[in-house]
């Protein structure tokens, strides 16, 4: 079922989501407002964990927290038995301060800083995912000075091209992430890691892209990862314990999107990995995945209030809302498509399409170019669906517009999980150079 079909209409004619009246939420918390359905998040987490149980595969689901990093989401992920993938000191800090168990965290990044590496080692994370030759020495000496052994995993490029937007295509050779299998760089890195006294190679990692609908690229990547694990064992005598296949399962943004259920991707992927490992004599291998978008994407929506409605005869109608590229930069960055509904006019017939325009000073700040909506007027509450992933996470203060609040909804209950930024917070890091103080030129 598509996310906009999962909503219901209550006795007031308003749209409800996770049992909450969206028009009431907009009134209570203000707009723009990110809304997250807790049970929807939990359902996907359980579905993923269930795949391991059903297939008998050993391993772990790491929530790719770059999709949405807040204290509440780390709590939910931990309660559901997931690990977390973090890509920065900031995400690591957020996870740890929410009480996320460090031993279930892995640190990614193609250019981790020394303080980030040290922070991860001090916390005792499960693994640091090595992404370059330089990093091997850096992690080794950081581990030596802290007196610890660093567990590392190696990010490799399996050379698989997934059909997705080019900016999020990461499995191909011309890509800043990971080291190539085909050009021998990955094997060279394995040898370097093996020669470091303070490093232990625990796993191999790949991530072939994001918002992928086809199963095939995942399966090809799985074959290549198992082949590589086997060649590491043969040529270097190292038996890696874990193969991590990254994330990437696509979700529904529009009627045209038809992904499989996220668990179907994972179940088939695990089945393939188990079979290939058996053939290669790599029994006992553990598997990991790192879904982000598929866990939180469809579980989130954004509420806006309609302001101006501009009819340009024979051209287009622009319906402007109180948010836009600041809270959702995906349209302007990737040309991403979204689906919207009027939460207070759910029963009204759709009229001609108009553009949903943002409030930011940039003509390209259009959330949806052609949105079939009922007649819009100032004060309407507009819901844009599937905004749970990479929206709040990528929000900016462009035009010094505060970042919206986020509420968590569960069976009709709602609670604030991110406060709305205030104007005071916008200026709290601003300083005036001393020579500007006396107000003379
Ligand atoms: N693991 C690694 C190493 C990744 O690089 C990513 C995403 C994931 C897991 C999670 O992938 P997911 O399951 O969410 O597809 N900002 C872009 C998406 C960038 C994804 C980057 N890496 C967007 O808004 O579409």
Image: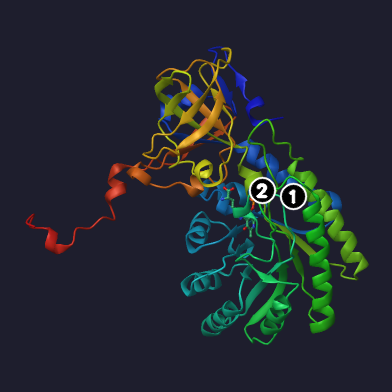
Q: Quadrant of the C terminus?
A: bottom left
Q: Nearer the viewer, residue 371 or 211?
A: 371
Q: CA distance from mark 1 to mark 2?
A: 8 Å
On the image, the x and y values in percent for residue 8 come to 62, 21
Residue 131 in view of the camera: yes
Residues at marks 1 and 2 touching, judged by CB atoms closer than 8 Å: yes
Q: Which residue is mark 1?
A: 49
Residue at (49, 72) in percent of width and height: 113
270 vs 399: above or below: below
On the image, the x and y values in percent for residue 16 come to 57, 23
Which is nearer the N-term, disc 1 or disc 2? 1
Q: Quadrant of the N terminus?
A: top right
On the image, the x and y values in percent for residue 77 come to 62, 49
Residue at (48, 23) in percent of width and height: 316
Q: Residues within 10 Å of mark 1 (few under 14, many from 20)?
A: some
Left or right: 311, with 167 as reference point: left
Q: Which residue is mark 2?
A: 80
Q: Residues within 10 Å of mark 2 (few under 14, many from 20)?
A: some
Residue at (57, 17) in percent of width and height: 346
| Secondary structure at numbered mark 1 | helix
Left or right: 220, with 190 as reference point: right
Query: Which numbered circle lies on residue 352?
Result: none
98 vs 308: above or below: below
């Amino acid at each position: 079922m598509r996310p906009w079909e999962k909503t219901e209409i209550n006795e007031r004619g308003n749209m409800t989501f996770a049992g909450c009246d969206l028009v009431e939420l907009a009134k209570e918390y203000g707009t723009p407002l990110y809304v997250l359905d807790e049970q929807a998040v939990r359902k996907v987490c359980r579905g993923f964990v269930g795949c391991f149980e059903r297939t008998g595969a050993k391993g772990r689901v790491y929530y790719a927290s770059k999709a949405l990093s807040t204290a509440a989401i780390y709590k939910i992920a931990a309660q559901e038995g997931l690990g977390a993938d973090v890509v920065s000191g900031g995400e690591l800090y957020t996870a740890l301060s929410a009480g996320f168990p460090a031993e279930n965290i892995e640190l990614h990044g193609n250019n981790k800083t020394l303080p980030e590496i040290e922070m991860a080692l001090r916390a005792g994370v499960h693994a640091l995912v090595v992404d370059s030759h330089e990093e091997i020495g850096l992690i080794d000496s950081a581990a030596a000075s802290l007196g610890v052994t660093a567990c590392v995993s190696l990010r490799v490029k399996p050379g698989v091209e997934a059909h997705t937007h080019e900016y999020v295509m990461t499995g191909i050779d011309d890509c800043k992430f990971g080291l190539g299998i085909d050009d021998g760089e990955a094997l060279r890195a394995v040898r370097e890691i093996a020669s470091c006294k303070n490093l232990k190679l625990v796993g191999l990692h790949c991530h072939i892209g994001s918002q992928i609908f086809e199963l095939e690229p995942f399966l090809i990547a799985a074959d290549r990862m198992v082949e590589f694990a086997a060649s590491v064992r043969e040529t270097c005598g190292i038996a890696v314990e874990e193969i991590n296949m990254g994330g990437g399962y696509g979700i529904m943004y529009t009627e045209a999107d038809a992904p499989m259920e996220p668990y179907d991707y994972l179940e088939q992927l695990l089945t393939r990995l188990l079979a290939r490992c058996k053939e290669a004599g790599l029994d006992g291998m553990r598997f990991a995945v790192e879904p982000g978008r598929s866990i939180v994407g469809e579980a989130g929506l954004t509420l806006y209030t309609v302001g101006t409605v501009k009819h340009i005869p024979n051209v287009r109608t622009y319906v402007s809302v109180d948010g836009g590229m600041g809270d959702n930069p995906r349209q302007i960055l990737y040309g991403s498509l979204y689906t919207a509904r009027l939460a207070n006019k759910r029963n009204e017939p759709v009229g001609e399409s108009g553009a949903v325009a943002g409030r930011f000073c940039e003509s390209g700040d259009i959330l949806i170019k052609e949105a079939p909506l009922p007649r819009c007027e100032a004060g309407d509450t507009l819901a844009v669906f599937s905004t749970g992933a990479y929206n709040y996470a990528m929000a900016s203060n462009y035009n010094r517009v505060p970042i919206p609040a986020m509420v968590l909804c569960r069976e009709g209950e709602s609670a604030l999980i991110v406060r709305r930024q205030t104007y005071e917070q916008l200026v709290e890091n601003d300083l005036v150079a001393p020579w500007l103080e006396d107000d003379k030129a």
